[in-house]
């Protein structure tokens, strides 16, 4: 696996939030996010990606798909090609067809997740050694096995792991910090899944901070999590705090809002 590609990115796709984002899916209702708030958080995120050295393609909003701002879920992208997924939530199933033309225009190889099963990109963590696929309420075993086969066709290895009970996606609870280190919640780390990594655990009460995003030289972290920011800063990471208060109300964090890859020609 090309070493640099795991968190070295020069291209990304995002999608503008639709006004319908206020009705996005959520496990616990803590009130609707505001459209203006989501739009501002999204705009700052796109700006941070650009500041980190990424060329960002912004797709137009899709009113019929409230969660379509979370482009990470209907597809996977690697320098070698893209894989179109089948999101496990019924209201999100149509998002794949919406992103397909863009991926077909940008990648020579675009694969389909083999039938049967479901898989969401939010359950997939790229690490230097392999691609981890977390089973969750959105990614079932059949989907994960099909995904291993598709990832294999792109020349990469993948393995199935478990997402903690009640956690939306595998990456809701973790993110890669560098080649050797992961940021994880305690509940996920307890499963032993990161035993071969240096594990940096988010402080108790800041679990949602685990969905951080390493992009090139910076780690983007939710600004509502001061203890996590202080900890990562103390460990020498260049932290970029970003507001995630509104998207957090619909169970999202920082990885969800982009598809990122390293384009060798870019
Ligand atoms: C959903 O439930 O699908 C959205 N409200 C949140 C998706 C977050 N995506 C991600 O973690 N990759």
Image: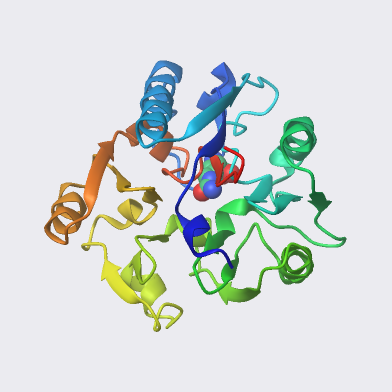
Residue drawn 60% across the image and 64% down it: 136
Q: Is residue 167 visible?
A: no
Please indicate whether residue 150 sits to the left or right of residue 53 in the image: right
Please indicate whether residue 219 sits to the left or right of residue 229 in the image: right
**Residue 219 coordinates in the image, percent (x, y):** 31, 48
Please indicate whether residue 225 sits to the left or right of residue 191 in the image: left
Please indicate whether residue 238 sits to the left or right of residue 89 in the image: left
Relative to the observer, which residue lies in front, 184 or 213?
213
**Residue 7 coordinates in the image, percent (x, y):** 45, 54
**Residue 3 coordinates in the image, percent (x, y):** 50, 64
Asked if residue 184 is positioned above or below residue 236 in the image, the reply reads: below
Q: Is residue 160 visible?
A: yes
Residue drawn 72% across the image and 64% down it: 151
**Residue 28 coordinates in the image, percent (x, y):** 45, 46
- For ligand 1, give the image quadrant: top right
Asked if residue 25 is positioned above or below residue 234 in the image, the reply reads: above
The quadrant in which residue 91 appears is: top right
Relative to the observer, which residue lies in front, 68 or 8?
8
Figure label count: 0
Relative to the observer, which residue lies in front, 14 or 222?
14
Residue closest to the far front? 265
């Amino acid at each position: 696996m090309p070493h640099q590609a795991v968190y070295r990115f020069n291209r990304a796709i995002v999608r503008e939030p639709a006004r319908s984002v206020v009705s996005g899916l959520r496990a616990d209702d803590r009130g609707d996010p505001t459209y203006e708030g989501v739009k501002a958080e999204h705009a700052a995120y796109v700006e941070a990606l650009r500041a980190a050295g990424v060329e960002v393609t912004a797709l137009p909003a899709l009113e019929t798909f409230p969660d379509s701002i979370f482009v990470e879920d209907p597809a996977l992208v690697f320098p070698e090609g893209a894989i179109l997924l089948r999101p496990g939530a019924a209201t999100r199933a149509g998002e794949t067809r919406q992103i397909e033309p863009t991926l077909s225009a940008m990648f020579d190889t675009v694969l389909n997740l083999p039938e049967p099963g479901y898989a969401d990109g939010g359950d997939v963590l790229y690490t230097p050694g392999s691609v981890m696929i977390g089973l969750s309420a959105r990614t079932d075993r059949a989907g994960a096995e099909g995904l291993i086969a598709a990832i294999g066709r792109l020349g990469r290895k993948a393995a199935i792991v478990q997402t903690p009970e009640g956690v939306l996606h595998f990456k809701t609870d973790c993110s890669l910090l560098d080649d050797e280190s992961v940021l994880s919640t305690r509940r996920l780390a307890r499963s032993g899944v990161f035993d071969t990594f240096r594990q940096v655990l988010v402080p108790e009460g800041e679990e949602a901070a685990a969905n951080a995003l390493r992009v090139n030289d910076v780690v983007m972290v939710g600004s509502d999590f001061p203890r996590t920011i202080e900890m990562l800063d103390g460990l020498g990471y260049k932290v970029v705090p970003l507001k995630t208060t509104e998207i957090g109300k619909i169970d999202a964090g920082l990885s969800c809002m982009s598809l990122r890859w390293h384009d060798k020609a870019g």
